[in-house]
Structures are given as C-alpha cells and as structure tokens.
Image (cartoon, helix red, strand yellow):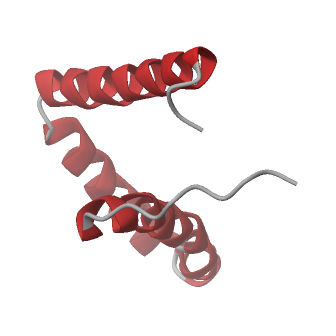
C-alpha cells in the first residue's frame, strides 16, 4: 500500500489535475454527439470540424511552444523530484 500524500493547501493546486481531466473527458465525450450529427447531417459535421480546425490554427505557434515547454518542464521536474526522494 502506498502512503497518501498530504493534500495541497492551495485550492488552485488541488483543482488543477481534476480540471484538466474534466476538459479531456469532455473532448472525448464530444465525439458521441459529433458522430450523430455526422450520421444525420454530414455537411454540418464537416462545417463544425472546419470551424474547430480554423480555431486551433488561429492559436499562435509560440503559445503552443509555451504550453509544451511548461508541460514537459513540469513532468521532468516532477520525475527528478521523485527520483531524488524529495517528492512522493
């Protein structure tokens, strides 16, 4: 049995991971209504997919790089902390 970590004092830290997972769940579950729309009205589904693609293409490349750097940096720092025994 692994020991439990103490809960973070900061409420933003406590909600960060669950909030990210909820967003990912919503994106995955969005495929259900999209597949129904595609079955009934393929033209509408294509237009919605093009709109989503245009939105994602409008996000500047440096913002993607910033997110990737932060995500990978956090992951590396977390792994290093666990390897050194600083974090559990």
Residue drawn at (60%, 38%) of the image: 88
Residue drawn at (51%, 60%) of the image: 6
Residue drawn at (79%, 51%) of the image: 2
64 relative position to 1: left or right? left
Extreme-right residue of the structure: 1
- Percent position (x, y) of residue 47? 34, 63
Q: Nearer the viewer, residue 32 or 20?
A: 20
Q: Is residue 86 above or below residue 34?
A: above
Q: Nearer the viewer, residue 63 or 73?
A: 73
Q: Is residue 12 above or below residue 58?
A: below
68 relative position to 30: left or right? left
Q: Quadrant of residue 51?
A: bottom left
- Percent position (x, y) of residue 67? 26, 31
Q: Quadrant of residue 82?
A: top right
Task: Locate the N terminus and report the quarter of the image it occupies.
Answer: bottom right
Residue drawn at (11%, 30%) of the image: 60
Q: Is residue 48 above or below residue 33?
A: above
- Percent position (x, y) of residue 56? 26, 44
- Percent position (x, y) of residue 16? 36, 60
Q: Is residue 33 above or below residue 86?
A: below
């Amino acid at each position: 049995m692994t020991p439990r970590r103490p809960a973070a004092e900061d409420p933003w830290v406590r909600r960060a991971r669950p909030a990210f997972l909820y967003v990912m769940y919503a994106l995955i579950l969005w495929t259900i209504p999209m597949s129904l729309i595609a079955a009934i009205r393929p033209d509408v589904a294509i237009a919605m997919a093009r709109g989503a693609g245009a939105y994602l293409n409008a996000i500047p490349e440096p913002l993607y790089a910033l997110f990737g750097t932060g995500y990978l940096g956090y992951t590396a720092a977390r792994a290093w902390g666990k390897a050194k025994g600083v974090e559990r």
